[in-house]
Image (cartoon, coloured by chain):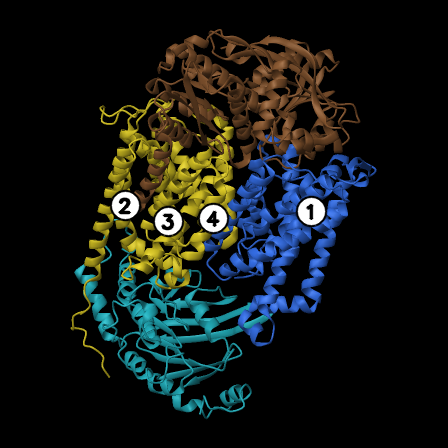
Amino acid sequence: MSSVKKLLGAAVGALLAGTASVAADTIKVGVIGPFSGPFALQGKNFQAGVEAYMALNGKTVKGHTVEVVYRDLPAANPAQSRALAQELIVKDKVQYLGGVYFTPDALAITPLLKQANAPLVIFNAATSAIMTQSPLVVRTSFTTAQTTTPLGKIAVDRGVKKIISAVSDYGPGVDAEAAFKKAFEAAGGQVVEAIRMPLNTNDFSPIMQRVRSSGAEGVFAFLPSGPTTLGFVKAFNDTGLKQAGIKFFAPGDLTQESDLPALGDGALGLLTTFHYAVSHESPENKRFVEAATKAIGSPEQLSFPSVGAYDGMHVIYKMIEATDGKQDAQKAVDAVKGLAWTSPRGPVSIDAETRHITENIYLREVVKGPDGKTFNKEIETFPNQKDPGLASQ
Amino acid sequence: MSELFRVEGLTKSFGGLAVSRNISLAMPAGERLALIGPNGAGKTTFVNLVTGQIKPSAGRVVLNGDDVTDLGAVRRVRKGLVRTFQVTRLFSDMTPEEHVTLTVLQREGRASRILSRFTGDSTVADEVHGLLGALGLVEVARRKVGEIAYGQQRLLEIAIALALKPKVLLLDEPAAGVPSSETPRIEQALERLPPSLAVLMIEHDMDLVFRFAKRVVVLAAGEIIFEGLPFEVAANDKVREAYLGNYANARSVA
Amino acid sequence: MQTILSIGLDAFAYGMALFIICIGLSLTMGLMRVVNLAHGAFAMIAGYIASYAARDLGMGYAIAIALAILGTIVISIPLERLLFRRIYGSPELTQVLMTIGITFCVIGITNYFFGPTLKTIPLPEALAQPVDVGFRTISAHRLFVIACGVVVATGLWFLIEKTAFGIKLRATVDNAAMADALGVRTQVVYAVSFAIAIGLAALGGVVGAEFLPIEPYYALRYMVTFLVVVSVGGAGSIPGAVVACIVLGAIDTTGRYLMPEFGNFFFYAAVIGIVCVFPRGFFGRAQ
Amino acid sequence: MQVIAPSEKLVAPSHTGAQIGRDVAGVLLIIAAGLAGYWLFPDNLALLTRVIAVALMVLSLDLIVGYCGIATLGHAALFGAGAYAAGIACVNGVTEPLTLIVIGAVGGAAAGLVMGTIMLRAHGLPQLVLSIAIVQLFHEAANKASAYTGGSDGLSGLMPSPLFGVFEFDLWGQTAYLFGLILLVFVFIVLKFVVSSPFGMLCRGIKEDQVRIRAMGAFVFPVLLKMFVISGAVAGMGGALAAISTQVVGLDSVSFELSANALVMLVLGGLGTLYGALVGTVIFMGFEHVVSSINPFHWMTMVGALLIAVVLAAPKGLSGLTDRLFASGRAKGGR
């Protein structure tokens, strides 16, 4: 067995030798994301966002070269997450940690940050509570509550008084259900029924049956982006609910751009709220989409995690600028508190108190473009939304 | 009546087909009984019924005055009703010594102990070596069973059975599949069985039957058709019919 | 009543989709004694081929299905020759190791060449529309899946019970050496059975894509579902697989309708219950 | 007739002595390898600690699969039960690491009792499916009981107190690793005794032929159930170690994926030797780590290729391969 370990040592050693020869003035950023496995698409978007930012803004900050080290964490696995973070900090000597798609993975890293003297910039993981775990966490994505809350008023404005909620039965789904209920009831609506669906549901027609028998005028849905959304939307159309005039509201995870080609015309007319649409019209976004498409290879694969990563890199660049390359996590985080800039998604800022991003939330409708492809068209803007989940705590 | 073991009206049907019909039999201590019969007579079914591998449709099995019909196979073994198998069922990775040690420990209720050593108890070791010696297995005691001769495996089957200190022993064709050069060793082992033990042997080899048995029972089509002394068997009409009805020649009863 | 009928219809369609995908696995496991965990990978490969043919090349749905089945079988031939042939007769766990390895490879390669996005197989106009069946509307595609399932079940039953090939197959399964001695070319029988199993996986992958969308992780994502269906039915049994798919489909669908929050509890508790009552599956062979 | 008199002594050299010698050497080798890992990769201790936690689980799986012949794809239920038991205890104020390991063992053992009771009702493929169903139920239960387990967000906020009041579980992970290594060696030695005890021999017998064991007058069910409980305790300790060193418990610790990976590692290393379990875990996780660092995007192909290569080159697992190379071999690997 020891010979095995030696072999391993040689292999890892060779790996080290490859990276150890970089100049002393290189600042490393460790990015942890799902680069393989069932969520590989989202990890690819992390990479695209990071590469797009570095392509547009250069690879140096104040003369310090920035180098990104990617580590794969295919599915939520806190033990592996912690091991990867530790290795990045101790062995690869990264000064900044970024990425993280799932909440438990982020929670496994937060206890390390203080000792590591490294800030964690979260590109995605969307549970409010992460921010309270460590003062060295900054987040450039969104929370489910943040993207969901505006839907309450939107639904009521569109004449829906009774709604049925159907969410995937896991943390973010439960968050979405709670946030929507609160906002919808505050606006005068009534959630007649709340369904939680197991994550591995393949056939959604029984759920649609429930929707039909509930007598609701609309349905609020939350599902993680990926294959299940396809089944859900298909079932919604196939069971005739769409023709029956039932309105459909959901946070934008459900109509992420990379799923739209698969959803096809069935998605037309779906109303979703989100912080970013690839179709957002602004010069910043045009530049971003161009660079990110180049990085990811195919325009069909571009989706929201890329913008979280892009802005995450922006925050990290600002941190490097403020500390001039010296490792000082607290100073770095302090430097970006209140930082405001124009992101591809619109104007954003880092809330000085919660360190979570304040951003516009857009209401979008899936429409068909001139090229025959469907896209999320922004039709209403809710400016400067903070995370209601954190605000209420 | 000093009978040790008795079955009464043992019957087993699968669906509508009766494979054992109303079999009754008694054995005193020290009995040497041979059960013979043509292929398909239900001999192995009978052993399985007696040892509790399968449940009878009707009838009783009585051991030492206790009705054991409702007990499972394991409890019957613990009460002293032990069998060997027609085709050896041994653990090819283990040695004969390990087989017998495990059996002795099991008999003493120590086999499922975690905090004890498998080897090292000298009384157990002595008993094991005694048994292996009695059956001539000492030379191969520490070879893996998969590597020893089939005749020796058959002997090991008997050693395992004896290690359970049975009262009644059912030997299911102890010489089956053994090359003729090795049969004398089996024969010798059978002769050395403890005298007080009641033994029921199923066997095809009539030489062995004649030498070993004091009494013979013939089973045909699930029924007992003859019960008596060995030399009477060949002369019995029913037996001749049963065998000749099945075979072109009656060599095996000759 | 209407609700029950309606749920029943959904359950039946879902069950039939599962049946078409799983029956091939049931045959490999029951008749060829190979635990082929890479079965789903073949269904997925077929999905990619069909998607490419129908979406990118604009071919018809029927042609896409045919191409997918053929293409998948062609891909499987070298795999059978080089890899699967080595594990016929190996212990199950060795087979598990090999076929999981194959699954990993297929996932990795697919991800590399085709990217991680979902692939769809556009349905023809006729199948894409909802159909009014009196008490409700149902998509024509679901009816098509049901029809496919019935055809596959009858076809297979006929093949195995009524044809010369079926006799050879059963003989080979019962005793390969004996069949060999009787002049059955067992290697050929194995190869053909393997091809049939793969072809069925391919068909299932394509027509079931509306339920189980095609993406690189397909084989692992649905592995549990496939294994459960096959063993509840009893490996190698066609009626068993049919019953298992319908019963499990019904339990799954009803559970998700009545109490979606506990849908999984309901489903797996039912699986435990069924296995405890039928320890060899509905129509399993005695061991 | 050459029947040897009962009094004659056995002539073959004592088996047991050689066996003990080999086991002592084996344990020393494990300790040496563990310490070598500590010196060679001081920066990868979190990974190595994770390897140890998983190795405990794979060891415990070997007890069930390798020694009793029961295939299971639900072993993470036992690992996860231990992890959650320790995690919940830790969040509620029991922070002493050794106590947490004990709690994990108890949790795992309880789960093993439940799992064994259900699984032993069937055989073969249906049994495998029972194991899958059970781990899925555990997973669902952990997801549902989010008030206690944190659900899909994970149970966070574990603050284990320093070991013996001195050694902290910190970023560098030295404490966690050495603690884990000592635990592993301890468990390994105990398990070596367990598998060579009468009970262990009985299990090996059951694996080969249950009918024979019954004919020896032993009940099969309680023996197997006992092994399930022991296995659960060991897996639970692995779970508790993971919980202590990670300070978070996620739903992945009761997942089908983890169960399947553990089985793959075991078969890769070789069944029924305990060494195989360790070799398989180290090779699989080490290989996965190396290739996924080289190419985080497409490493899965390489792992798949490794598994295929192992089946082609060493169908009995890697320890079976060493057996073949050094014909003297330890206890036989694989089946």
Tags 4 and 2 touching, CB below 8 Å: no
Asked if labels 1 and 2 share a chain, the reply is no
Mark 2 crowdedness (10 Å alpha carbons): few <14, some 14-19, many ≥20? some
Q: Residue B86 at what x, y percent from top left?
A: 41, 73
Query: Does the image show residue D120?
Result: no
Q: Chain of mark 3?
A: D
Between the residue at mark 1 and the residue at mark 3, the CA separation in whole angstroms equals 38 Å
Query: Which of the chains is cyan?
Result: B
Tags 1 and 2 touching, CB below 8 Å: no
Tags 4 and 1 touching, CB below 8 Å: no
Residue C104 versus residue B158 in the image, above or below: above
| Position of residue A124 in the picture relative to residue C74 (left or right) | left
For mark 1, what is the residue? C16
For mark 3, what is the residue? D62
Q: Nearer the viewer, mark 1 or mark 2?
A: 2
Q: Residue B199 at what x, y percent from top left?
A: 34, 76
Chain A drawn colour: brown
| Position of residue A203 in the picture relative to residue A336 (left or right) | right
Query: Which of the chains is blue?
Result: C
The residue under label 1 is which amino acid type?
Met
| Position of residue C136 in the picture relative to residue C199 (left or right) | right
The residue under label 4 is which amino acid type?
Ala
Mark 3 crowdedness (10 Å alpha carbons): few <14, some 14-19, many ≥20? many
Between the residue at mark 1 and the residue at mark 2, the CA separation in whole angstroms equals 53 Å
For mark 4, what is the residue? D305
